[in-house]
Amino acid sequence: MTERHLRAVLVEAERVAEQYDQVAKAKDSPAHEYLRYAVLRLLEGDANSIPEEVPQVDGVTVRYGRDQAMYDSWGSDVEWWDTVPPQDDCTRFRVFYPEDQTTVPRVILIVMAALGAWRVWEGSAADCGSYDHRERREVHFLWPEGNLAEALLENRIQETGGAVAPDGGQAGDVRDRMLVSDGSTSAEDLEPRTKRAVEEAMTVSLLAKGGRYEVLAASGNRYEVDIIGQSCTCPDWQQRTPDGGCKHMRRVDYEIKQGQVPRPDGHLPLQA
């Protein structure tokens, strides 16, 4: 059973590598990124083709990030690390499901087992990050980098002639703030907040490992952006919470992807 589910994850990860290669741009481990995004798409029902091995459960959402980065952001507010201390080279999946489910939906357990992740926490959903936690439960899984699934995916990609993206980058869900669409040919094609993010004079600096940045705006105001927790102290984010983030969050994303500032894990970008 686990083998069939692993195959379903690998097939979807191949599609991600072909159709959403931006997921792994500027990432240390492209296969790791493709796989965890594939898990998100499968469990949330967003995959191009949902295999029968992964029956859908309404209301399931998936979020993820580096375990150590999550601990740096929220460790003092939650009990997640009471049993297992933060792991530096692991992804922590937060899988949300409706609280009327008396147990963790079986499909979640099977897919995570196929991936090689292990369950480390379960309970009422916490108000951490910009996620809808109301009337929800969540279950957490740790998944180490350099695992067998990554090697299997790399082999499949090489056999089909696909490319693995270069390394570097941030943790999190890349759907949140894509800066430029594939069809964009100029700044005029950008969404207004993104256009301002790219064109306005701003200075970005890493405040703390774990994804906290300071943005000095052209107005002279300073704002703190939590790129992993997805928040900003500016009025636009605090009052309107725009889809895709405020211009300061987008500017931080842009500079990370351009290699102009350290990554959220504190590592310097690779030099070309």
Image (tube, rainbow, N blue to C red):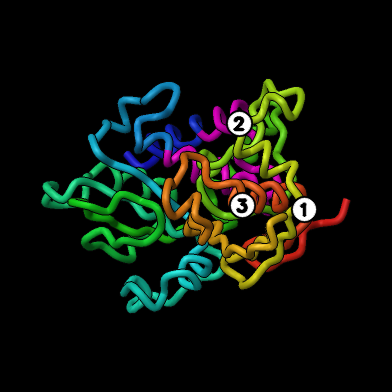
Residue type (three-letter) at the residue carrying disc 1: Gly
The residue where tag 2 is placed is 191
Residue type (three-letter) at the residue carrying disc 2: Glu
Dots 3 and 1: beta carbons under 8 Å? no
Q: CA distance from mark 2 to mark 1?
A: 22 Å
Residue bounds of the magenta highlight = 13-40
In the picture, the disc for residue 74 is: none
Of callouts 2 and 1, the N-terminal one: 2
Q: Is residue 187 left or right of residue 240?
A: right
The residue where tag 1 is placed is 259
Q: Main secondary structure of the magenta part?
A: helix
Q: Secondary structure at mark 3?
A: helix
Near mark 2 (Cα within 10 A), the count class, few <14, some 14-19 or many ≥20, is some
Q: Is residue 115 left or right of residue 159?
A: left
Residue type (three-letter) at the residue carrying disc 3: His
User: Would you say residue 62 sits in the magenta stretch?
Assistant: no
The residue lying toward the viewer, choosing from 258 and 155, is 258
User: Would you say residue 14 sits in the magenta stretch?
Assistant: yes
Of callouts 3 and 1, the N-terminal one: 3
Q: CA distance from mark 3 to mark 1?
A: 16 Å
The residue lying toward the viewer, choosing from 215 and 10, is 215
In the picture, the disc for residue 248 is: 3
